[in-house]
Amino acid sequence: MQYTPHEHKHNFSVWAAARATQRGFATVSELRTALDQCGVEQFARQPKKLGSFDEFHRDWCKTICAHLQSGGKANVAYGRAAKLVNVYLKSMVVLPDMDGKAAAIIHPPIDRRLLLSIASDTSVDLRHREVCRRIKWTQLDEDKYFDLVAILKSIIGDKPLWMIEKYWEPF
């Protein structure tokens, strides 16, 4: 049985993404199947067409939502699918090459900890802080998700998008 470095990274990344997303929602197995079927692994193998990243992201997340809904999951929001994709890509693409072009544009995992930390930073525009304070990432639809990503980009400026995670407090 051959076990490649890519397969090893993929397995860990899927597990980490599923665990970050699953609480009270779906099993690791269900989330793994949804992630495996959406096509994001091909991008992780060889990030290309970075100018189309947001469109790829939309396709991956819509596929994940449709798969989970067809399996009987209710209330499948874009925000949950996005966190699954974003944690996966953070592990597969961003962390191994933080100076790479792909790492600069891949969306960060968005959760309550990140949003509340941004909301508490008085150097951030008050309107952005209010949005971050009110948003529930598990209920984000596609449009609100991309509105939030635009806010995160404006907060971080011309720096790589992963740097917004300076606000993420894991404990």
Image (cartoon, rainbow, N blue to C red):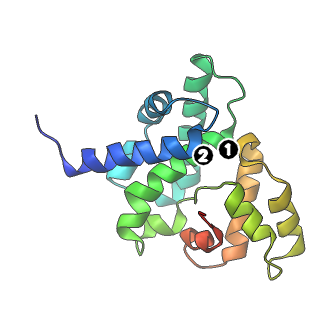
- Image height check: is 110 above or below 63? below
Please report the residue visible at 58 percent of the width from the left and 25 percent of the height from the top.
68
Please report the residue visible at 47 percent of the width from the left and 59 percent of the height from the top.
50
x and y percentages locating residue 90 in the rendered image: 46, 58
Front position in the image: 71 or 52: 71
Q: How crowded is mark 1: few (under 14 residues within 10 Å), some or many (20 or more)?
A: many
Residue 74 sits in which quadrant?
Answer: top right
Q: Split into 4 quadrants, where in the image is the N terminus?
A: top left
Q: Tags 1 and 2 in contact by the CB under 8 Å rule?
A: yes
Front position in the image: 103 or 17: 17
- Image height check: is 134 above or below 19? below
x and y percentages locating residue 73 in the rendered image: 64, 22
Q: What element carries label 1?
A: helix
Note whether residue 49 is visible. no
**In the rendered image, which residue does mark 1 sit on?**
79
**Left or right of 6 in this view: 97:** right
Q: Is mark 2 on a helix, strand or loop?
A: helix
Q: Which disc is residue 40 wearing? A: none
> Residue type at mark 2?
Ala
**In the rendered image, which residue does mark 2 sit on?**
82
x and y percentages locating residue 38 in the rendered image: 47, 35
x and y percentages locating residue 159 in the rendered image: 58, 78
- The number of callouts visible is 2
As drawn, the residue found furthest toward the bottom would be: 123
Front position in the image: 169 or 92: 169
> Residue type at mark 1?
Gly
Please report the residue visible at 12 percent of the width from the left and 39 percent of the height from the top.
2
- Image height check: is 33 above or below 153? above
